[in-house]
Amino acid sequence: MADKKVTLYTDGACSGNPGAGGYGGILIYGSVQKEYSGGEALTTNNRMEMRAVIEGLSLLKYPCAVDIYSDSAYTVNAFLNGWLYFWQKNGWKKADNKPVQNADLWQELLRLTALHKVTFHKVKGHADNAYNNRCDALARAAISAMKSSSGEALPR
């Protein structure tokens, strides 16, 4: 695994849940920062949180050591608490034998995290973390851009 160290901040947002959703992220390598964002017309906040991580990891061109900072307990805890590996071993079913939600995105996250040395970090959302706040602004701007391009009335 390459010794390139990358920091990735991510956030997702939704206007309604489900509703229009957006994600944003910031990749940091040394003094270089790259922002990215996008969205979907009908989605959930959890899917946007996961999509933010997927898109960030997809931008990497070679294996790296990646510190991922997210305010999504859903995403971070699935890795830190081993839920994801249990779900995979259990045929994408939870302990109660019900299907795991967002299995498609979990599988993509597993594929991408296997390419890198990834460490997840939980940050407090809407607090004093400037990078997390910027990611939130990127995600919300993606929602606004999507709504305005579709002609949907924007909230006041």
Image: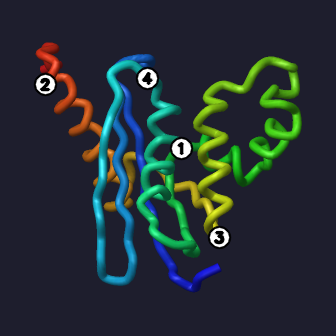
> Which residue is under mark 4?
43
Left-right relation of 147 to 80: left
The Cα atoms of the two marked residues, 2 and 1, are separated by 28 Å
Residue 138 versus residue 58: which sits nearer the camera? 58
The vertical placement of 140 against 135, above or below, is above
Do the numbered discs 3 and 1 sit on residues whose CB atoms are within 8 Å? no
Q: Position of residue 59 (x, y in %)?
A: 41, 60
Say whether residue 28 is visible.
Answer: yes
**Precedes in sequence: disc 3 or disc 2:** 3
Disc 2: which residue = 149
Find the distance from the CA under tag 3 to the CA under tag 2.
38 Å
Decide which of tag 3 and tag 1 comes sooner along the chain.
1
Q: Is residue 54 left or right of residue 99?
A: left
3D distance between C-alphas at marks 3 and 1: 20 Å
Checking the image for residue 89, the label placed there is none
Q: Quadrant of the N terminus?
A: bottom right
Front tag of 2 and 1: 2
Q: Amino acid at mark 4?
A: Thr
Where does label 1 land, which residue? Answer: 72
First in sequence: mark 2 or mark 1?
1
Q: Secondary structure at mark 4?
A: strand
